[in-house]
Amino acid sequence: MLTHEQIQSFRTDGYLVVPDVVPKVTRDAVKDEYEGLLDQLCARWHAEGRITTPPDRLESFWDKLQVGYDAGCDWFQPMDISLPGEEITPDTPMHFGPAVFDLLRCEEILDIVQSLIGPEITSNPIQHVRIKPPARTLKGDEIRAHITATDWHQDRGVGHAEADQTDMITVWIAMTDATLENGCLQVIPEAADRMLPHCPRVQTAIADDFIDEAAAVPLPVPAGGVVLFHPLTPHASRVNRTDGFRWSFDLRYNVTGQPTGRAHFPEFIARSAAAPETMLTDWRRWRFMWEDARATLSQEPHIPIHRWQSDAPFCA
Ligand SMILES: O=C(O)CCC(=O)C(=O)O
Ligand SMILES: [Fe+2]
């Protein structure tokens, strides 16, 4: 649970950094699960002749990611914990597994979320993994906010308008130490009590002149710590100028019963004081819900994940 001072600080600033939240055992289980997943991907890329080095000659998790990236093999979507905003096909990959499901249900995270929005907590399907290679290794046309630096935005702006009143918290988890040099998150405190206009640019970003980037506060946090922020808090991430990877998850939680902002993706009840029997505890059921959504969505016209139009006056 958060202290009274922490809650006050969150309410005033729109963000809060909390060190040492996610237990090492929980993070290690996620790392093991991702290692296994990456080994499978590497074996496939090698079998397809897309990477020449045999996977067992690649030393570390990071080497495997880098070799895959350099060879143009996508690991981002197979490792993400949500379907993409683009066209969905019956075999669009995404990752489901017991360890990452345990991360979504991590008691220490839910205790913090409960301090801010109460005990009826839904795991919101707007959730991502971001494993960011050193910027110097990125391809010139790399624009994905899950791989390269993220532009200024509000999380309210990347969901549908039906969720504009939803009580939601973003929980950004440092899997590796997040530093000024490797691309930690940054926020503009107290900047907004309303939705700012966004433009679909390289990424979906707040329109020019609506925030003062000079007021940005960088938020380094050691692995296992989290950054919490309000859906109207403008945030971005810095460029990874180191030689190492920077790994985070961003999860969202909202008050159960309120719109998530992506109704076409599955949500689940992570905690409930009023009706504990409604909580989802089986990761296979979680996987089934996503597989079911993918099968359905692949048959339907594409649903855009945000509301912004590039021909809006403030985007000129
Ligand atoms: O980690 C990043 O690059 C951006 C994360 C973000 O936008 C979020 O957590 O909502
Ligand atoms: Fe965000």
Image (spheres, rainbow, N blue to C red):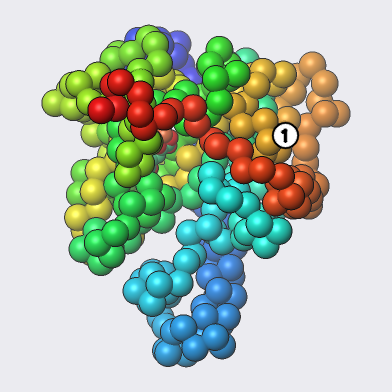
| Picture quadrant where residue 312 is located | top left
Q: What residue type is labelled 1?
A: Phe
Q: How crowded is mark 1: few (under 14 residues within 10 Å), some or many (20 or more)?
A: some
Q: Can residue 91 be seen in this view?
A: yes
* Left or right relative to 104: residue 313: left
Pointer 1: what residue?
268
Q: Residue 188: x and y, percent?
A: 27, 23
Instruction: Please state, as top left, top right, bottom left or bottom right, where the C terminus lies in the image.
Output: top left
Q: Residue 54: x and y, percent?
A: 47, 90
As drawn, which residue projects farthest toward the front? 311
Q: In this view, does 296 lie above or below 271?
A: below
Q: In this view, does 132 lie above or below 289?
A: below
* Left or right relative to 112: residue 201: left
The residue at 47%/23% (across/down) is 156
Instruction: Please state, as top left, top right, bottom left or bottom right, where the N terminus lies in the image.
Output: top right
The residue at 32%/44% (across/down) is 202
Q: Residue 47: x and y, percent?
A: 56, 88
Q: Tell which of 308 and 54 is nearer to you.
A: 308
Q: Residue 251: x and y, percent?
A: 53, 37
Task: Tell me the quadrant of ligand 1.
Answer: top left
The residue at 57%/80% (across/down) is 44
* Left or right relative to 281: residue 248: left
Mark 1 residue CB less than 8 A from any atom of ligand 1: no
Q: Tell which of 310 and 13 is nearer to you.
A: 310
As drawn, which residue projects farthest toward the right? 277
As drawn, which residue projects farthest toward the left? 214
